[in-house]
Amino acid sequence: MTPLAQIPAWQALQAQCEALGASSLRELMRADPMRFEHFSAQFDGADAHILLDYSKQRVDERTMTLLDELMQARALRPAVSSLFGGAPLNTTEGRAVMHMALRGEAEDLYQADGTPVMPDVLQVRERMLAFADRVRAGQWTGATGASITDVVNIGIGGSDLGPQMMVQALEPYCSGPRVHFVSNVDGAHLKGVLKQLDPARTLFVIASKTFTTQETMANARSARQWLIGHLGETATRQHFVAVSTNGREVASFGIDPANMFGFWDWVGGRYSVWSSIGLPVALALGSAHFRALLAGARAMDLHFRDAPFKHNLPVLMAAIGLWNINFLGLDALAIAPYAQNLSRFAAHLQQLDMESNGKRVQIDGQTVSYATGPLVFGEPGTNAQHAYFQWLHQGPKVVPVDFILAAHTESGLEDQHRLLAANCFAQSEALLRGKTAEEVRTDLIGGGMAPSEAERLTPHRSFPGNRPSSTLLVRRLDPATLGALLALYEHKVFVQGLVWGINSFDQWGVELGKQLATPIAAGLQPGAAPGLHDSSTLGLMQHWQRLREQ
Ligand code: F6P
């Protein structure tokens, strides 16, 4: 693999960074009154519309051309063909990466490692959706014959974040049973959910690709005990279903294989919400909306596969990210959806991006000499404005922001929605413009403040500005749009991982802590020897034990 630093486009981008460094966003805006038209792109598909405005990013035409050249030098086009062709791109696990097939149709003819996958995908999808609709219609009943009013999804990571985010995002479209999510091994999570529920009307979905994840299995066992305590041993059959790739473990847990919905090892956990891991979403929304969600994502897949790079939203967003991270040195990304229903969107993107591209070793085993995936965080606006935005506006570090906003609201509160939009636009404008010392002085003195006091306050009340952001503007936050939006970020992550030469589809970094937890858990049993640990870990374990004895 050619080292990135030796690629001419990479070198030219470094020079471009110095050349452009002096010009601010204010100047770039002044220099080109059509900057919005020149630095925005649109996606339309499956009734979803997404506008990407990246004119508030610190780029010019030459930057975008060089980023395009960089991606061509990294063979993006052939790599996209390999991805869609089902090549084993997850090289450390020898697996294809085929989540696009989960939202595919029969005509898509997707394969994984040479085997057609659509027949199986469609068959499991239909079974899963039929089951969801049966539960919703009250045709699937609990052990006492009562219909299901509450579903508890027990899973973690990709088996929790995606479905949870979607159920919340599409709340106005939910019409089925209430869906709850339990992920944390902290018993408070399960306890807090169970105390709201009637066991006779509760269905548990145990969601785990491996069906061995410690947290999920611990919660699943406790949930089963709770259910059996209320309804007896035989009740599990009607109150527990599983979503997994591991039929053997599902059976040994005691869930009837007839009540298991499978998926495949070519689906990464953080890309699995489109598979039967989406069962809680289908239970909440019904099959028609779930299909719309898939259709939106599929439309984005086709856009990513076919659209020229200049108009290709995932490629543009990846390019902007590479520019910010590797050339401007801005290695974090704030996600600010101006949509309360997207309150788990940043959490989901955090796993998607950071578990995928939080890597320091290239596919060929060499250590990278450049930054890779960003630190991703976020909360919805306007709440975020009263929390971390101070840091974004005046902190010494610059963090690019992705703003997300819908034109329509389902709330019916149109004036509030206008206020929400106004705040979203105002924040990106403020980050761009900032407020100079001169502007602050003029304001303060114009407002009657004594010049000496104005002088004292000016440094505190000025804003550096020149802080980049992108805005994703959608028509409405409906199932198809959400599908397209999430697929957009998935493909962005793929493109960036390709340029960095890393494997975006494994996650070995989460293993060590998992391994160490097992002997530590044994050492925390009453009377057990703590085992060999460093002094800090040992000290903490012993102090914890002492506190429990008090
Ligand atoms: O965080 C590590 C991880 O393997 C994720 O990739 C995955 O989504 C999560 O654990 C849960 O795994 P499983 O679905 O196998 O329980």
Image (tube, rainbow, N blue to C red):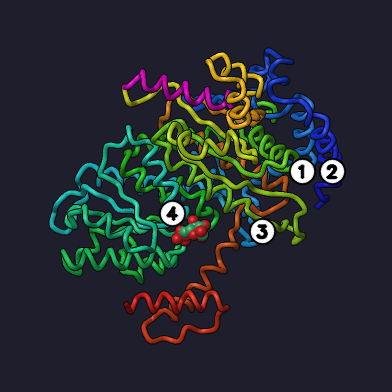
Q: Which amino acid, mark 1?
A: Arg
**At which x and y percent is residue 545?**
39, 78
Q: Which amino acid, mark 4?
A: Ser
Residue matched to label 2: 7
The image's mark for residue 510 is none
Q: Which quarter of the figure has residue 61? A: top right
In front: label 3 or label 2: 2
Residue matched to label 3: 91
Residues packed near mark 3 inside 10 Å, few (<14), some (14 to 19) or many (20 plus)? some
The answer to whether the residues at label 4 and label 2 have Cβ atoms under 8 Å apart is: no
Report helix, strand or loop for mark 1: loop
The answer to whether the residues at label 3 and label 2 have Cβ atoms under 8 Å apart is: no
Q: Which amino acid, mark 3?
A: Thr
The image's mark for residue 159 is 4
Q: Nearer the viewer, residue 311 or 449?
A: 449
- Alpha carbons under labels 2 and 1: distance apart: 9 Å
Q: Nearer the viewer, residue 163 or 245?
A: 163
Q: Nearer the viewer, residue 394 or 516?
A: 394
